[in-house]
Amino acid sequence: MEQKEDLLKDIISHAKEYGFVFPSSDIYDGLAATYDYGQLGSELKNNIKQYWWKSMVQMNENIVGIDAAIFMHPTTWKASGHVDAFNDPLIDNKDSKKRYRADVLIEEHMEKIRQKINKEVEKASKKFAEAFDEAQFRATNPNVLRNAEKIKEIEDRMRTTLENNDLEGVKTLIEDLEIVCPISGSRNWTEVRQFNLMFSTELGSVAGDASTIYLRPETAQGIFVNFLNVQKSGRMKIPFGIAQIGKAFRNEIVARQFIFRMREFEQMEMQFFVRPGDEMKWYNHWKAARLAWHKALGLGDKYYREHDHIKLAHYANAASDIEFDFPMGFKELEGIHSRTDFDLKQHEQFSGKKLQYFDPELNQNYVPYVVETSVGLDRMFLAVMSASFKNEKLEDGSERAVLSLPAQLAPYKVAIMPLTKKDGLPEKATEILNDLRFDFNCQYDEKDSPGKRYRRQDAIGTPYCVMVDHQTLEDNTVTIRDRDTMLQERVAISELRAKIDEKVSWRNLLSK
Ligand code: GAP
């Protein structure tokens, strides 16, 4: 098994080598935490978007999609709370000059204690084998209990200090926990400061406060301000949802780990408008539905875990993350938030316009409550890449790099190859290509030996390779090779479309 640190490095270089992801403005040595998606990366990204859009919008009668502008009226961000409260608590280490998010330092410290507990449980599980009762062990073992109590204490202190914006308290907590800078190893910390994450720019040619606008830090507000437009024009009845895919921008201070944390990224968000009082029912519904959506990709259930928030965003009364086991460990992939009626009420207040719904069943007007699902497209991309990328040792001693992408997400579904460049084989292969490309994204490949061509397709995740050989000219059959099993079978050309479709059709994935 490849070491996890090496895995991220390998994925980054594989992504560059095969045209998935490049550092942005590479010829100028790149721009920190900014990346470009290449010719295969944009196909994979589009397929992830399609998976989300199809299952969210097209498979749900009561969810519709929009595409709002990135620039919004500046009051939007005053109303949403982002101007005043979209901050990260930052702390610098005076020796290494590195900047950290104070809450992340504390979270990481708690994670280390959690790992101690897990090791203790693992040890006991090995010792007692089948007789091991994990729940009982966790409830009674003194070391586990002591560490669990420590975590709880830290969580409580972190929540109280952050909720009260007690930055001195946050620093004291870091000092009390004896947290050291991972680079310098020292505890020489600055004060904790709040830093607003929104990028601002000027609208038009006149500078000044009145013309300052922000690059949206989330797509959600474009949905809130369009709530009534969509509800009225679409005659939507509560409960209903509005979905959107689009760019968001945050001036992340600690932007690193490849495309995991970027300053320009894409979100796939859905706001589900419900009756006040129904929000916890829908919150639980969407938590389960979103986890099932991720797991349906078949990357492996072990990659996912849920994490309920301690520190709630200024708009939420409940929030949970779906975390993914990235090469850097378990980290947030998607957030599910119960946002109450905070946003719509704020927009009512700041715009002076009513944002209410008349519920014919209750015969009353109300401001709906909102349950939000928000997944980072780039993080989905990294999750899919990192779970799919493998360096495999084959039986004959050779190695292959393979991306075992879910077939629906693969950039190309099939590569069509003539065995040689002569004897009419390229013409026959082109004929097949020209037919299949109406249904699937196909690649034509005639360069190098068949073995090399198979390896190339494995490395970019193409589920099938079709080889056109001399027998094809005689009986209209080809061989079709499966990326994962590497087995080849001979099939009639007339059966190709159905065979490929069986594997790559959206129906298979969406009906799971
Ligand atoms: N509208 C709610 C919202 O924006 P969030 O938890 O701040 O909530 C939602 O962000 C998702 O957006 C995250 O789960 C993550 O997948 C993605 N995301 C957030 N910041 C990101 C960044 N700097 N780079 C890449 N993805 C990011």
Image (tube, rainbow, N blue to C red):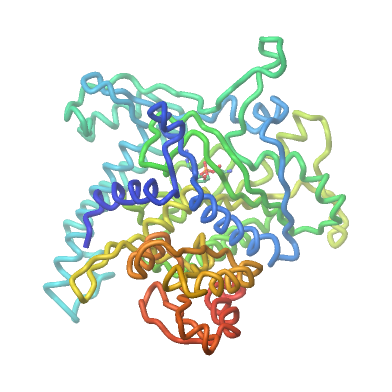
* Residue nearest the viewer, comparing 488 with 91: 488
From the viewer's perspective, is residue 470 above or below residue 230? below
How many marks are shown on the rendered structure? Answer: 0
Please indicate whether residue 234 sits to the left or right of residue 47 in the image: right
Q: Is residue 494 left or right of residue 189?
A: right
Quarter of the figure with the C terminus:
bottom right
* Residue that appears at 21% across and 65% down: 140
* Quadrant where the image shows the N terminus: bottom left
Q: Is residue 474 visible?
A: yes
Residue 230 versus residue 452: which sits nearer the camera?
452
Q: Position of residue 438 (x, y in %)?
A: 66, 68
In the picture, measured across the screen, residue 248 lies left or right of residue 32, that is right
Q: Is residue 24 above or below residue 233?
A: above
Q: Is residue 94 above or below residue 254?
A: above
Say which residue appears at 58% left-offset and 34% top-offset.
217
Q: Position of residue 494 (x, y in %)?
A: 60, 84
Q: Position of residue 252 (x, y in %)?
A: 45, 31
Residue 384 on image: x %, y %: 43, 58
Q: Nearer the viewer, residue 127 or 47?
A: 47
Residue closest to the far bottom: 475
Q: Residue at x 22, y 51 (%)?
A: 147
Position of residue 74 in the picture relative to residue 323 (left or right): right
Residue nearest the viewer, comparing 232 with 489: 489
Rendering quarter of residue 235: bottom right
Residue in view at x 38 percent, y 42 percent: 258
Q: Is residue 296 visible?
A: no
Q: Residue furthest left?
A: 127
